[in-house]
Amino acid sequence: SRQVALGSRPFASMASPLSCFGHGPGLGGPQPPFTDLYAVLGAEAHPDMPQDELRSLYESRRKEHGSPSNAEAAGPPVSKSLLEEAWEVLRDEERRKAYGTVWLRNKQAFALPPQERADVFRRKGNELYSAAKEMTRGGGMNLSAVQEGLKLYRAAMQQYTTAAALTPNDHRLFSNRAICYLAVEDLPRCHEDAQRCTELRPDFAKGWYILAQVLWQQGRHEEALQELEKGLAAVVHNRELLELRADLAGGGGVSSGLVGGGGGFAGGGGGFA
């Protein structure tokens, strides 16, 4: 049976306070939105501000919570817990230095046009997928490796989801995420993404390939063959689609997943998009 081939770890842990602020584009793992810790202390705060001035801003913010009349002078209101967590990171020289890297990366990334920002997330998703595939290579012998691999697949999905919010008509994001859904055996979502991919780019053979495979795995054999015919009408004489049709029509079935093996997918653009 034929298979589709696709184709960090999160920011180093610095204790819990930083972990709740997200790490932004280009860093692994499913994350909450990035929060600017300097902005928590005040609009004028920045990474080059001397520590004593930063402390003054923090103390001013603290007074805001003790006296509502100070709120307007101190700036937009923030929760006390957020303020304390921000200061716990920024008051420590080493943590502040490490956070500065995160801060700069986010500022640079979010200054990019939407397509370029989406590409940052897409490429990171591809990296996470490759790491997940390597982690789970060889089957389910090592339970901890399988569990870590599943986390990486889900992290890759999150990167594609974020990218799709920026560029919702990029067919590559849906084909890539569809294969990740297959890896975690989420067949309905895989089917949905594969279908969307073929709608966005009918001449993208890999979208049809994934769609036919997931339909077959769902037991919808007749539909799988019908979609393959649609794909071959859109991408005439595509070798991978023809070979898949021969496999399915011959009763050979498909592999249990799209993420094993190592066979490439030349017709889809040379592997993971």
Image: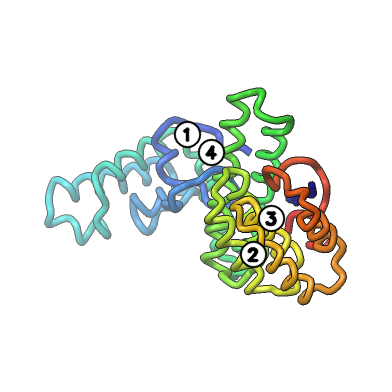
Q: Where residue 223 is drawn, which disc sits there? A: 2
Q: Position of residue 44 (x, y in %)?
A: 39, 57
The label nearer to you, 3 versus 4, is 3
On screen, 6 above or below 192? above
The label nearer to you, 1 versus 3, is 3
The label nearer to you, 2 versus 1, is 2
Q: In which quarter of the image is residue 118?
A: bottom right
Q: What residue type is labelled 4?
A: Ala
In-front residue for pair 218/74: 218
The label nearer to you, 3 versus 2, is 2
> Where does label 4 land, which residue?
98
Q: Where residue 213 is drawn, which disc sits there? A: 3
Q: Are marks 4 and 1 in contact (CB under 8 Å)?
A: no
Mark 3 and mark 2: span between their CA atoms? 10 Å
> Where does label 1 land, which residue?
93
On screen, 260 above or below 203? above
| Left or right: residue 252 compared with residue 95 | right
Residue located 66% across and 45% down the image = 129
Residue 52 appears in the rendering: yes
